[in-house]
Amino acid sequence: MFDSPQREINGEELLVAILGYVAGILTTGAIVPEILKLVKKRKADELAYSWLEIIVAGMILWTIYGFLIESWPLAILSGLSGVLYFMLMVLKYRYAQKRFKG
């Protein structure tokens, strides 16, 4: 499955790959300002744990799917998105713990 022979990529395939990477970079990068805001404010009350858990699970599944169909933009950028959303979850948990400790 992953050991396909090298082949030439035509112009249309290149455009599709570029489109995939650009879309992935934009959607993955969209979470960065939220992480920065959360770190700056040191509070994440507005983020629901259930939403974070569902989105991280979804990103894991998209990553697996991307690898299975050999869609590298999907696999790589979904994996990166999953890591970033997991960071949000860890920060939310950490800030909630600090709030309870005083």
Image (spheres, rainbow, N blue to C red):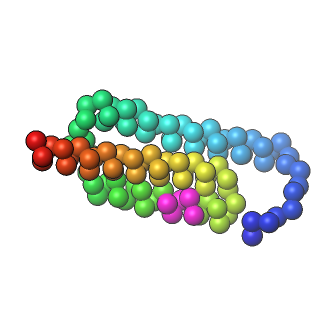
- Residue 75 horizontal/vertical position (percent): 61, 55
Q: Quadrant of residue 43?
A: top left
**Quadrant of the image containing the N terminus:** bottom right
- Residue lying farthest to the front in this orientation: 101
Q: Is residue 9 left or right of residue 98?
A: right
What is the span of residues highlighted in magenta in the rendered image?
A: 60-64
Q: Is residue 19 left or right of residue 37?
A: right
Q: Is residue 14 visible?
A: yes
Q: Is residue 17 left or right of residue 48?
A: right
Dominant SS of magenta comes to helix
- Residue 49 horizontal/vertical position (percent): 27, 54
| 58 or 35: nearer the viewer | 35
- Residue 61 horizontal/vertical position (percent): 51, 63
How many discs appear? 0
| 11 or 28: nearer the viewer | 28
State the residue at coordinates (32%, 54%).
51
State the residue at coordinates (36%, 46%).
88
**Quadrant of the image containing the C terminus:** top left
| 84 or 54: nearer the viewer | 84
- Residue 70 horizontal/vertical position (percent): 70, 60
- Residue lying farthest to the bottom in this orientation: 1
Q: Is residue 36 left or right of residue 100?
A: right
Please say whether residue 59 is one of the residues in the magenta stretch: no
Q: Is residue 46 visible?
A: no
State the residue at coordinates (44%, 36%).
32
